[in-house]
Amino acid sequence: MSKILFINPVVREEDVPRHVPYGIALLASIAMENGHQVQVYDANAWRLGEDVLRQVLNADDWDVIGVGGMTTAYGSIKAIVSAAREECPHALILLGGGVLTSLPREMMGFLPQVDVGVIGEAFLTLPEILTMVDQKGKDWRSIAGTISRGADGAFVFGPQRGLLMDLDSLPYPAWDLFPLEEVYFPNSQVLFSEEGMLATRRIDLNVSYGCSLICRYCYHLGIAGDMRYVTEENGDTAVQFDVPGNYTRTIRYHSPEYVVRLAKHVYDKYNVNFITFLDENLMTMDKFSGRTWMSEICRLWGENGLAPHPDETPGMPEGSWKGIHWSGTSHATLVTQDILKTMRDAGCSHLVYGYESFAPHVMKTIGKGATPQSNIRSFFWTLDAGIRPIPNQIIGFPNEDFLSIRENMAAWEKLGIVVKPFFATPYPGSEWFTTYRKQLEAQYGGDLEAYILALGDATSITGVISHNFNVVELLGLRELMVNKDRKRIDEYEQIWRRNRGLKEGQPSTLFPGSVWAAE
């Protein structure tokens, strides 16, 4: 059996580590179920630098070193695989996750230390790779869902890997391999609701994969059925995701019984008092189940004693509770008043809504299917149910203009909120990355890797896709929006128009599909 070291790369260095890497925890559990010896070095949790990383790499004679994560962790991954190759020259270095799946050829080129890349879901691919390692083989092309290097250095793809449809066959994540008590539980607080702020022992769960929407800025990590292999004109294999007019969605979710058993497991074993559901869109699953999935989870939540209630144990701080409060994601057009009330009774404290924009002409280009009216309606429905709605917004969309900025501000007044928007960021794998790739590369001197190294969590600007505004303008306009400074926005629009030779009333954008273009 193989000795495997999984390494979780550093991500979001501006914040404390808050989330156990769910994918690595699942893969570690799968590997152990198959009899392998597994250890994890959570570089994001410990953040102890390269010296400690190299000590870990030299701590044993590793057969396999597995690394993976989001594209925003690329800088850390690059340093990890470089150190791993130097310290463990005979180990097989595996790379997986969204960072590899979104750009498999490019990543294998950027990271020559990587031996095999895992494209898409690794649940079935990893055990086959480990069997190959045990057998001292190297016929990676025979394993579906892989990219490797041929004898001539050319990249070789295995067949496309299908998705695992029976999610209930998965084991529970191997949380014991991560520093829960030392790092993650002390960082349990979620500042979106009173219950979230009082959380002291939080664990995250992911109980579904996929989303029914086609948001053009979004990347589904190759787990939503949107990924396909195509043959290019030169005969090479390429991985393709959403392209205009060609969208595919495979919706998968754990059964309510599995979800509640898993929640009961973490409650009994780790004494958690808060769970965050990491799912892309809980309401998609509820709709696709015929509106039974979420209500059944809530029913079983209560039947298994997980619905939160006051902890009246002597000496407990005021506001303490037994059971589990929880939070997750929602969608304006898919949520209903009835399910919101049911979720609140079961302990839901807040729901994150990706409202993105309140401007109709912008919303039409995003592909989300929402309207300003559905956004506003869902906001008040959620409040009425006793759940905190957490609105996310984005500016810098391709057809963002002064009209959309004002419409967003008007919606904030109607809702009684202020939102600091993220910036529209086309991550590799998204439709808008494919559409604007050349422009994005040009912003980094033609260097795609430089763009990827710069990518963060969209709180700062890394690549501009707006047809109307540059970096400085987007930064300044967002600041004026947050400060409700309409006077200076009006003044700057006049300057902006003069600089472009636009007359009063003349359209400020001609982006295809916008209200101006329609006129």
Image (cartoon, rainbow, N blue to C red):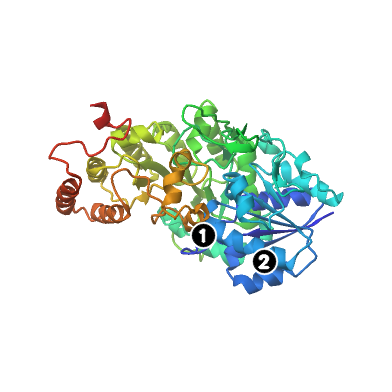
Question: Along the polypeptide, which appears first: circle 2 or circle 1?
Answer: 2
Compare residues 389 and 43 and report the one nearer the observer. 43
Return the mark for residue 83: 2
Q: Residue furthest bottom?
A: 51
Q: SS of the residue at dot 1? A: loop
Return the mark for residue 188: 1
Which quadrant is home to the N terminus?
bottom right
Kind of residue sitting beneath label 2 = Ala
Q: Position of residue 187 (x, y in %)?
A: 51, 63
Q: SS of the residue at dot 2? A: helix
Residue drawn at point x = 70 percent, y = 69 percent: 56
Residue drawn at point x = 36 percent, y = 46 percent: 394
Residue drawn at point x = 65 percent, y = 37 percent: 236
Compare residues 206 and 162 and report the one nearer the observer. 162
Residue 42 in view (yes/no)? no
Q: Residue furthest left?
A: 504
